[in-house]
Amino acid sequence: MEYACEWVKQNLGEQTPSQPYPCEWVKVHWSDATKVAPYPCVALQDYFETQKLTVTPAAATGTYWGTATSAMQSDIAIANGAITGTLKFLDSGALATDWGEGNFMALKFTVPSGATSCKVGLSPSEGSGLVELDDDKDGVFKVTNKDTQKFVIVTTNGQYTLTQEFDLSGLTCETE
């Protein structure tokens, strides 16, 4: 059986899982009683929508490494696979001292139930690569090139892995 719907192509891309996915998941979870046509795209879309890690801008009132979120960014929006808004230039404070002057983005994450690992970061990275989310589910990221970097989230439940990418080219990065 072929799984050739546009949603599967757009969201699975070239992933090569360790088992014949999506066949196994559909065989276990889909039935005529639980899903309506088109088969199996609705079942797969429902599954992936529940596995996505949700990302939102960090609260403007938050503070990271002694720097207020409002001093780092403004008007950050996350929609349709893109992050937009303005990243302010930081040339002082702990973030600039530890990671160098530049533009920093503060984000908040909501992890789906059943996830065993959630890694986040910029690709290409300037050093850290993707990092596992810690207990507070917040992160601050230094954007060095909004036109070539993507923000990446990799979530797994131990069996399947979902990768989300966000375009950064719509960000405005202040220089001073």
Image (cartoon, rainbow, N blue to C red):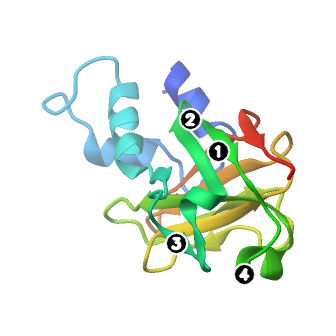
Can residue 4 be spotted in the picture? no
Q: Do labels 1 and 2 touch, CB within 8 Å?
A: no
Residue hosting label 2: 11
Return the disc, 4 or 2, that comes first in the chain's sequence.
2
- Name the residue beneath numbered marker 1: 165
Q: Earlier in the sequence, mark 4 or mark 3?
A: 3
Q: Considering the numbered disc 1 on the image, is that residue within a helix, a strand or a loop?
A: strand
* Residue tagged 3: 63
Q: CA distance from mark 4 to mark 3?
A: 11 Å
- Residue matched to label 4: 94
Pointers 2 and 3 in contact (CB under 8 A)? Answer: no
Disc 3 secondary structure class = strand
Q: Along the polypeptide, which appears first: circle 1 or circle 4?
A: 4
Q: Nearer the viewer, mark 4 or mark 2?
A: 4
Say which element carries label 4.
helix
Q: CA distance from mark 2 to mark 3?
A: 34 Å
Relative placement, left or right, of 89 versus 5 is: right
Q: Residue at x 31, y 63 (%)?
A: 113
The amino acid marked with disc number 1 is Glu
